Amino acid sequence: KFMKTSEIRESYLGFFESKGHLRMDSFSLVPKNDKSLLLINAGMAPLKPYFTGVEEPPRRRVTTCQKCIRTGDIENVGKTSRHGTFFEMLGNFSFGDYFKNEIIPWAWEYITGVLQIPKDKLFVTIYLDDDEAYEIWTTKTDMDPNRIFRLGKEDNFWEHGSGPCGPCTEIHYNKAGVTVTTAEEFVKAGDEDKIVEFWNLVFTQFDGDGKGNYERLANPNIDTGMGLERMATIMQGVDNIFEIDIVKDILQGVCGIVGKEYGKDKNTDISLRIITDHVKSVSMMLCDGVQPSNEGRGYVLRRLLRRAARHGRLLGVKDEFLYKVVDFVIDNYGDAYPALHQKADYIKKIVTLEEKRFNETIDSGMDILKEYIEEAVKENKTVLEGEKAFKLYDTYGFPLELTEEILEEKSITVDIEEFNKNMKDQRERARAARGESSYMGADEVPLNKIDASITTKFDGYNNTTLKSNI
Ligand code: ATP
Ligand code: MG
Ligand code: MG
Ligand code: MG
């Protein structure tokens, strides 16, 4: 049954309203009072105070469609069928109210009853020793027991340091129609994108001490997350999240702007998808008040924008073009997120400024990087001096990750330690020049003078991401 993305969004929220949930708007991508997270990466993330009891929820049952950014997935974007750096997560949450006995049958009712997905296309995974979940799946739904696989902590246990944690059960769709009979075959088909995970149901039932000891919570919680785009690929019978209704129009827009056709060449398609995804993320972040900078979430924004610009170059674009893509994003997402319409001019202005700034140096930077690569190849070196990567960063505005990504194609890595040392030295020089305490205006100075505060490879947010990310 074909369903538009907007219809799926509405249907999910409406279904859980019918089960007593309060529908809440998506929270901002910028976390509030949460230093552990750079950007909201799951439906539960902005609801943490309700889960921990720090705040009283407006109702003990809540349902949302939450905007999410996951930079940890950046390498997958355009290559797998299922990853974007921006996506929307549908979710329903129980704050010490209903538990496994309710959510498993509801989930089954929703996907097989409301959405009418054929049962023989579905698989379920549960945590190794979660016999309770197995019991519910096999007695309270008509899920075929042969289609349930038990997986380990990696996949089916949600844990983040100490505190509330627990097993989860995930629901998957057999996109390629493959035959699998064992857990190993199942995992392999997932890695190959033939079977796609689309819904994670987390049972927060323990209080962990972080050392492997778990105590059962008196009032366990439920936290679920379903990727809206992934569900749309299923309901629209398309191959990947870039081919669903609201995303395909943006992708086609990009094709028109850069003068390329989609579906003719593998690498071109990857670049087209990357541009589509990254401009969407950038637009959403700008709309939520993130500003480009050289640290924190502003750096994420800058990095995504520059990566999109670079892929434009790869496709032969010479001038600024990302702002034109923003129009297609707004056309397709403005109904769901009206603030995009209100801030359209602002978003396009910042995108244009940022791209212009980068374009002024990108060509010279690329030439220099090419020289570095030739040199390294000639000398059989597999590591680029950190000083050189720093020069690209400092003078040409190349995010470290961009340099790394280009080098990776030649199997060359960067001496990160030396890069960081250069960064630190420069920071200290800049600070001394400005007088100790002032950081003000750091963003106003030209790029090559910027007080760059990145000192790590920024896996901060990968590490702080909750284990299952939900
Ligand atoms: P995967 O294994 O495919 O990377 P995940 O296990 O990391 O997904 P969860 O953390 O369980 O994902 O998030 C819940 C749901 O959110 C997933 O089942 C999926 O439908 C959706 N989702 C997660 N990451 C992405 C992404 N990068 N792009 C689109 N949807 C996503
Ligand atoms: Mg993932
Ligand atoms: Mg997964
Ligand atoms: Mg998952």
Image (cartoon, helix red, strand yellow):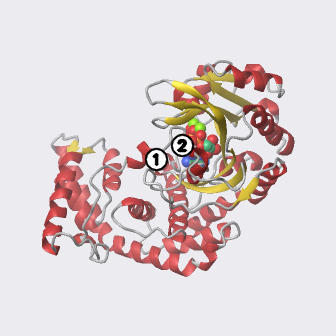
Residue found at x 71% / y 51% = 62
Relative depth, front residue between 450 and 461: 461
Q: Is mark 1 within 8 Å of ligand 2?
A: yes
Residue 109 in the image: x percent, y percent?
83, 38
Residue 1 circle label:
none
State whether residue 439 appears in this view.
yes
Relative depth, front residue between 258 and 220: 220
The residue to which callout 2 is attached is 469
Specify the quadrant of the image occupied by residue 442.
Answer: bottom left
Specify the quadrant of the image occupied by residue 394.
Answer: bottom left
* Left or right, 48 with reference to 365: right
Which is in the foreground here, disc 2 or disc 1?
Answer: 2
Residue 372 in the image: x percent, y percent?
21, 53
Residue 80 in the image: x percent, y percent?
55, 43
Residue found at x 31% / y 73% = 443
Residue 387 in the image: x percent, y percent?
17, 54
